């Protein structure tokens, strides 16, 4: 069958090299291969195997992760980017090997799922993509958000988020942003996981703040005191320098898991600023990676201070002030009475 060999071999070889030995039928035809030549290669004992409809792989063994991604991306046709667990794995975040490769496509795309290729029509294109050969991948925050919506086991969603955040590959606020941009359906487990993980990261970040204070020999603050102005509760910052009227807040509570969280953050900051308190907010990532800069900013604020704010009083954590007014759960003025120990309302 000599005619089966008449095609642009160098072009086919270059295509296979770029695509991890994966080629689409349309690409093979563009190289000059005939239908008979393709059928000859994908026969039962031939050198190629069919990975997906119209997508072929050189060899007869199992496909690698990169081959599966290339095959799904080529099969999609008008592909935007690979997302979900396959993209999470590509970014190097721990996780299971996905059974399906999720590919984002335009809303009006007609092609259906096939084999291990699952196509997701989206009207919210990813803000950033990363190229690996012919395949585009979404950013890790988008990949996690999309993957979490497909998981039904809460422990898997929690591990997905925690593994990426604790290794410093992504910040919670980035995942929360993608959560807000995407569909509400299927987001409940991710929202809960973000809240749980943010509390864990917060405790680590508060410890980082204490280390910075000691390492750079900053004046010792009060940690987690409740602040009052003329008897009215204001807020409970993570660190407070009463002699200077300066407060530091770890921003995990500002990783806005809902508009209400963001509003509470703004209200809390506004209450402190209205009383003349200088508030320095730091995200946990900065406390971890830019300690010297954080120390400089705190020291500068302390040095520029005009002194203590005489109308501000504080109650260290665990103490029980009496006859004080403080906002209720939603920031409304509550009745007078003792303040319970633990984090104050309104934070």
Image (cartoon, rainbow, N blue to C red):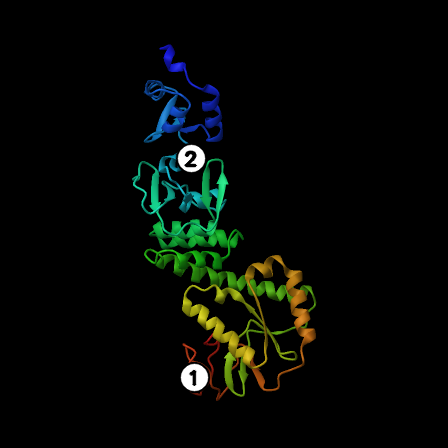
Mark 2 vs mark 1: in front: 2
Q: Which residue is mark 2?
A: 70
Quarter holding residue 3 = top left
Q: Is residue 91 left or right of residue 299?
A: left
Q: Is residue 246 left or right of residue 136?
A: right
Quarter holding residue 216 = bottom right
**Local secondary structure at mark 1:** loop
Quarter holding residue 137 = top left
Q: Nearer the viewer, residue 136 or 66?
A: 136
Q: Which residue is mark 1?
A: 333
Position of residue 74 relative to residue 150, above or below, is above
The earlier-in-sequence mark between 2 and 1 is 2
Label drawn at residue 187: none
Q: Position of residue 269 (x, y in %)?
A: 52, 74
Position of residue 190 relative to residue 282, above or below, is above
Q: Residue at x 42, y 87 (%)?
A: 335
| Residue neighbourhood size for the residue with mark 2, other residues' Cα within 10 Å, grouped as few (<14), some (14–19), many (≥20) | many
Q: Position of residue 191 (x, y in %)?
A: 39, 60
Q: Quadrant of the N terminus?
A: top left
Q: Position of residue 72 (x, y in %)?
A: 38, 37
Q: Is residue 226 visible?
A: no
Q: Is residue 256 visible?
A: yes
* Marks 2 and 1, how far apart at CA: 59 Å
Q: Are marks 2 and 1 in contact (CB under 8 Å)?
A: no
**Local secondary structure at mark 2:** helix
| Residue neighbourhood size for the residue with mark 1, other residues' Cα within 10 Å, grouped as few (<14), some (14–19), many (≥20) | few
């Amino acid at each position: 069958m000599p005619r089966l060999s008449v095609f642009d071999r160098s072009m086919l070889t270059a295509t296979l090299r770029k695509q991890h030995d994966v080629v689409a039928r349309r690409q093979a035809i563009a190289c000059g291969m005939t239908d008979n030549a393709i059928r000859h290669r994908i026969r039962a004992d031939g050198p190629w195997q069919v990975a997906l409809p119209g997508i072929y792989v050189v060899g007869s063994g199992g496909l690698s992760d990169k081959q599966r991604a290339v095959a799904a991306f080529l099969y999609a046709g008008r592909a935007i980017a690979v997302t979900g667990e396959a993209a999470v794995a590509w970014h190097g975040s721990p996780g299971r090997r996905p059974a399906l490769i999720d590919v984002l496509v335009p809303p009006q795309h007609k092609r259906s799922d096939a084999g291990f290729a699952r196509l997701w029509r989206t009207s919210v294109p990813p803000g950033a993509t990363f190229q690996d050969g012919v395949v585009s991948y979404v950013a890790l925050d988008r990949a996690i958000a999309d993957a979490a919506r497909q998981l039904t086991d809460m422990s898997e969603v929690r591990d997905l988020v925690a593994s990426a955040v604790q290794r410093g590959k992504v910040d919670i606020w980035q995942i929360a942003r993608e959560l807000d941009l995407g569909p509400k359906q299927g987001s409940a487990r991710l929202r809960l996981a973000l809240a749980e993980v943010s509390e864990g990261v917060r405790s680590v970040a508060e410890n980082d703040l204490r280390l910075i204070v000691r390492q750079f020999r900053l004046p010792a603050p009060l940690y987690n005191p409740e602040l009052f102005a003329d008897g009215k509760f204001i807020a409970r910052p993570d660190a407070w320098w009463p002699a200077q009227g300066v407060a530091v807040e770890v921003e995990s509570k500002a990783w806005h898991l809902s508009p209400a969280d963001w509003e509470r953050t703004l209200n809390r900051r506004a209450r402190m600023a209205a009383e003349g308190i200088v508030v320095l907010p730091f995200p946990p990532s900065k406390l971890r990676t830019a300690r010297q800069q954080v120390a400089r900013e705190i020291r500068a604020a302390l040095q520029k201070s005009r002194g203590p704010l005489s109308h501000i009083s504080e109650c260290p954590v665990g103490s029980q002030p009496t006859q004080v007014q403080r906002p209720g759960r939603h920031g409304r003025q509550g009745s007078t009475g003792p303040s319970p120990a633990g984090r104050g309302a309104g934070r």
